[in-house]
Amino acid sequence: MKPEEKAILKRFLPANSLDMVCDSIKRENINLRITASRSTRLGDFRPPKQSGDSFRISLNHDLNQFQFLITFVHELAHLKVFKQYKNKVKAHGTEWKYWFQLLMKPYLEAEVFPSDVEDELVRYLANPKASSGSDLSLTRCLQQYDTKQRTKPTVEEIAVGTIFKIPNGRTFRKGERLRKRYKCQCLHSNRWYLFNPMAEVFVVNQ
């Protein structure tokens, strides 16, 4: 990795994780891209298009340093699974969970994370889900370290019956909470959908 690339990456990571991340990028021949914010994902992994090409990992630019690292390791686990199994196993199945847990271990041993994040992360790693954002306790803990100013409310924060829009333009009315998610009705189709309480939305003036 070029010194200028390492200097850029340093801005996005906890200080004592930089060398480990750079080693992984070099060892696995990763083309790492830092992208604009995407509402549907924090990062993604793409295999090489043809032999000799780099593996590609992209990460949203507006993640805080701890979420950025967790997302990188999440996508690195996908890379490891692809190298071993190609597309013959489930995306977030047993194989991915094994690699995610294994790859995160050195960062936990190096005490990269603050104690509150570490506690939540260790609990989450016992049975990691497809997205760390689906674990509300971990998400709330990570949000305490956000440096960007949030300008939109979350589904959790608005009142039942409030009409809101999501980035693709669809409009919904908030309903009651069902276990961990909120039931919301799409006003275009009248179908009901479940929303993560932490999802940021645009409130429509009524």
Image (cartoon, rainbow, N blue to C red):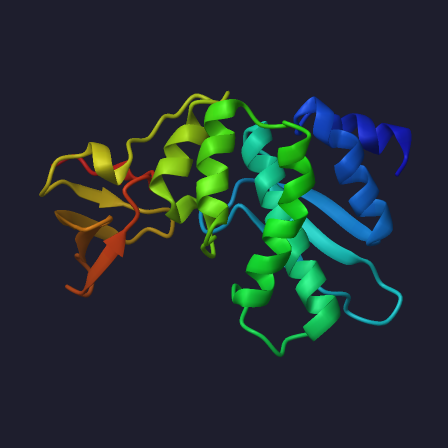
Q: Quadrant of residue 54?
A: bottom right
- Side of 45 where 172 appears, left or right: left
User: Which of these two is toward me, 31 or 119?
Assistant: 119
Q: Quadrant of residue 160?
A: top left
The answer, for residue 46, to whether it is visible in the render is no
Q: Is residue 194 above or below residue 81?
A: above
Horizontal and vertical percent for residue 17? 71, 31
Q: Residue furthest bottom?
A: 88
Residue drawn at (66%, 26%) of the image: 14
Of the 4 image quadrants, the one containing the N terminus is top right
Horizontal and vertical percent for residue 178? 16, 52
The answer, for residue 39, to whether it is visible in the render is yes
Q: Quadrant of residue 108?
A: top right
User: Which of these two is toward me, 195 or 88?
Assistant: 88
Residue drawn at (13%, 40%) of the image: 162
Q: Is residue 84 above or below residue 104?
A: below
Horizontal and vertical percent for residue 206? 11, 37
Residue drawn at (17%, 57%) of the image: 187
Q: Is residue 42 above or below residue 112?
A: below
Give the tally of numbered discs: 0
Residue drawn at (58%, 75%) of the image: 89
- Side of 203 where 29 appears, left or right: right
- Side of 58 where 26 appears, left or right: right
User: Which of these two is toward me, 161 or 115?
Assistant: 115
